[in-house]
Image: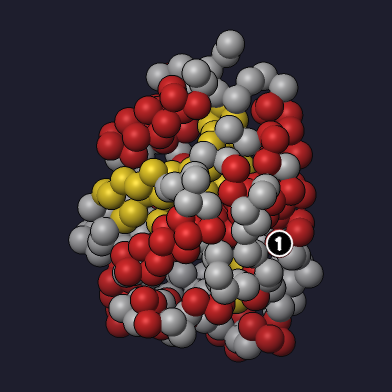
Amino acid sequence: MSNPTVVLVHGTHVSSFSWVGLTTELTLRGYPTVAVDLPGHGIDGFYPRSYQAPQDPAALAKEPSPLAGLTLDDYAEHTIGIVRRARRNGPVVLVGSSQGGVTLSRVGNEVPELVDHLVYMAAYCPVELPSMAAYLAEPENAGSLIAKVTAAVAGDPAELGVARVNWRTADPVLLDGIRDCLAGGFSDEELLRVLNLFQPDEPAAIPLAETRVEAEKWGRIPRTYVRFTEDRLIPPALQDRFIAEADRLTPHNPTEVHSLPLPHVGPFSRPEVAALLAGIASRAGK
């Protein structure tokens, strides 16, 4: 049997580029690796004209986005197509970070027979509440610094149909807030390098979508949750709640848990991340 294919699903406002380094390392270790670009992301990403320098803040708040109509169904359908093709070659390990977790959950509900292992990396995994958004006001999310990111939102998401974050802001207060939330400990150079991989628009429908997992489908797939202990977007307390809820749903199939001292954005190219995923893939192939 061939080694498992590792399929990586990115989070909000990023793309397959966020996995660069990890994809190379896993492939060189003998595990074919595919980094998904969800619809409207990566090479198909949209960058408003008003987002370019010199920026036009008034226009940025109003310029229409082609991502406005995208839904979690679109994300799941696209990912299932990739997983289906990968499964022809052998086992599949499906990995998601951040908001990518809800795509994993939907894929697990729809095609559990195609996935040999699920890996949530500091990712949303709604079980007892219906959506990502439903957890934002919960006590375990109280330590989240997400408001420091949404402070950089341009325009009204309800009007635009997307959450549009101005990652290219020159406001030092906003940049420091984004660092606090996503990239604690990063230097200015490291932060700007990461932000240049981000794209401004993300469909507003995704956090509101029904994403609860199903015990008889998703729940039969072996799964791992990788806790990021320095995460200030999804606090460790909320990560732990996702794990606990999943284990209550499927006590016969408990979550394998690992912890890494990383902020929300990783970076995922860290050697310990590659080693962990390679180990999971090795076991999934047996």
Measuring from the top left, give residue 186's x and y in whole percent: 24, 59
Q: Amino acid at mark 1?
A: Leu
Residue 192 in sight from this viewpoint = no
80 on left or right of 277 = right
Residue 91 image point, x, y percent: 60, 25
Image point (58%, 33%), residue name: 116
Vertical relation: 202 (above or below) 118: below
Number of residues whose C-alpha sits closer than 10 Å to that of mark 1, classed few (under 14), some (14–19) or many (20 or more): some
Taking the spot 64% from the left edge, 83% from the top edge, the residue there is 157
**Is residue 239 left or right of 200 when viewed as pictured?**
left
Residue closest to the eye, 67 or 71: 71
Q: Residue at x 64, y 64 (%)?
A: 211
Residue 249 pos. (x, y %) = 53, 58
Residue projecting furthest to the front = 252
**Placement of 191 over or under 30, stated as above or below:** below
Question: Foreground: 45 or 30?
Answer: 30
Image coordinates for residue 200, horizontal then vertical, percent: 56, 68
Residue drawn at (55%, 70%) of the image: 128
Of residues 200 and 157, the one nearer the viewer is 157
Residue 112 shows up from this direction: yes
Q: Quadrant of the N terminus?
A: top right
Q: Find numbered disc 1 in the image and state the secondary structure of the residue it sits on.
A: helix
Q: Which residue is mark 1?
A: 72
